[in-house]
Image (cartoon, rainbow, N blue to C red):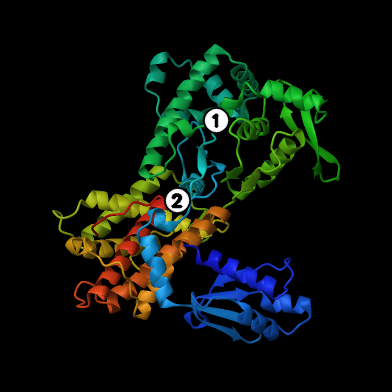
Amino acid sequence: MNIKLLLTKIIKKTFIHASIPAVYKVNIQQSSKIEFGDYQINGIINIAKKLNICPKQLASKIINLVQINDISSKIEIVEPGFINIFLKSNWIAQQINQIYSKNKFGIPSVIPKTIIIDYSSPNMAKEMHIGHLRSTVIGDAMARTLSLLGHNVIRVNHIGDWGTQFGMLIAYMKQIKLNDQFYKKININKLEKYYRKAKKEYDQNPHFAKMAQEYVVKLQNGDDYSFKIWKKLIRATIKENQKIYERLNITLQENNIMGESMYRNMIPNMIKDLKNKKLAVISFGATVIYLDHVKNKQGKKMGVIIQKKDGSYLYTTTDIACIKYRSEILKADRIIYYTDYRQHQHLNQVWNIARKAGYINKYVSLEHHMFGMILDKKGRPFKTRSGNTVKLKKLLDEGLEKAYNFILSKNYNKNSVNIKRLAQIISIGAIKYADLSKNRATNYIFDWNKMLNFEGNTAPYILYAFTRANSILKNSKKEQEKLTKEIKLESQQEIQLALYLLRFEETITIVAKNGTPHVLCSYLYKIATLFSSFYEFCSILKTQNQITRHSRLKLLILTAKILKKGLNLLGIETTEQM
């Protein structure tokens, strides 16, 4: 049930009958305060000004023509021209009954599109760190949400596995003469240690830097020795990353990895094609593409290099091939990238080149869903005391320990609950929710005390609301088997909770369109607070009137289901006991 969409269709017809030109769009919004009704028709004042008539006169005309009596109990004008719509409680009850008995809460399946979501993209030969958290959890929440709506979602973990860092590593390992026995025992910690040493050597030793570049070219040209070592390095990194994904309840699997190396066989023919189309030219031995909007400080055109004069490729080259593959082979309708703001210029250049080359169909939507940084309590980039980037494994371990100690402080009966499992759910949920509940475009401060709090807009608060609803349902299993079909909403607490339960589809639609999981978090928090009020003021199992008791049970069942589904879309597990 999408009430906003329903009202928009009704008011759109009213606009036509009121002779309002089609250029003026209907703007229906949820009311911010209960005294302003349930929904508002906004924009009437601006339309009236452009049509050179009085806003109140136009609003009156709309009210007189609108046919909404079966839905609305009242529709009113507020000076100078706002229109407030109050919904009928019995209509809300009817809609609750409908979504109660339907799959996916009555959310209709969309015309499926092929949507590629590019997210996480950890560095190879290094441990995942806190800088990968936002891309990973936001991208995964979007993949889950778009899948719920019925889209063909292709999850892509695009890793940089074909560049200079591997030339450095292969050269360094060749230099220190590691044997095959080492590669059998290699792990991410050893690998990162060798990477740091290789990077230092690369920066300080020109001879080593030249050798590393030569190994990049050898690797990209299929050299057997280089390829053999490269595969072992990649395997060790992927194995460790997958452990992090499993702990974070991320849906990415190994078969979602599409690294730069995947497109290596496409690149030679693609460069040849770009030259034939006069987009790429040779400049000082390198292959370059000049773009009108890419200029230096003197205002002259700057070239985007796609092949160095030594024959090696850059990550821009791979990204062009990547987007060509996604459009031509995967037949994408929409491609969403979850990377931070620093990648924006690069992506725009890649998209510009791909569009000019005809590698992307005109209808394909290309979207860069940027996100802000994670900061410490002093508003600085979140790092360890030594100034290093926080490793995700250490962050998750710390969260688990804090949640575990918190649970112990509450004197739980150890026999009635698996404390370690509960600590895992609470800690991971708290970390993910703290990130997802913030507008992705903004920075946010990482604060354990706030995210593990059982009060306010946090995962523990919403998880607790779910467990409280679930405990009542456990005691009413027999009653649930014979619920009456009729629903009656009497109190304001019931009506408001029911109305927000109906807004689940509206919420999901916004998230899917804009890539804004924080909207879903705000919705779940509102449901949890409304449920708390409903629980406090409305007796459920002890109510003598059967229709009232069964109506409230239905609201309770829907509340639990929507909280569980909403948290699932965020990648947060639920627990039956807290």
Residue assigned mark 1: 259
Q: Earlier in the sequence, mark 1 or mark 2?
A: 1
Q: Residues within 10 Å of mark 1 (few under 14, many from 20)?
A: some
Mark 2 crowdedness (10 Å alpha carbons): few <14, some 14-19, many ≥20: few
Q: Are marks 1 and 2 in contact (CB under 8 Å)?
A: no
Residue 76 x/y as whole percent: 56, 84
With 109 as the anchor, is 429 left or right in this view? left
For the question of whether residue 388 can be seen, the reply is no
Give percent across and percent down for residue 391. 43, 43
Quarter residue 319 falls in? top right
Seen at 40% across and 50% down, the residue is: 571
Q: State the residue position of label 2.
A: 385
The quarter of the picture where residue 44 lies is bottom right
Percent position of residue 20, x then y: 72, 73
Q: Residue at x 59, y 51 (%)?
A: 370
Using the image, determine if residue 201 lies above or below residue 513.
above
Residue 348 x, y percent position in the rendering: 70, 44
Q: Name, please, the residue furthest toward the top.
A: 224
Q: Quadrant of residue 320?
A: top right
Callout 2 secondary element: loop
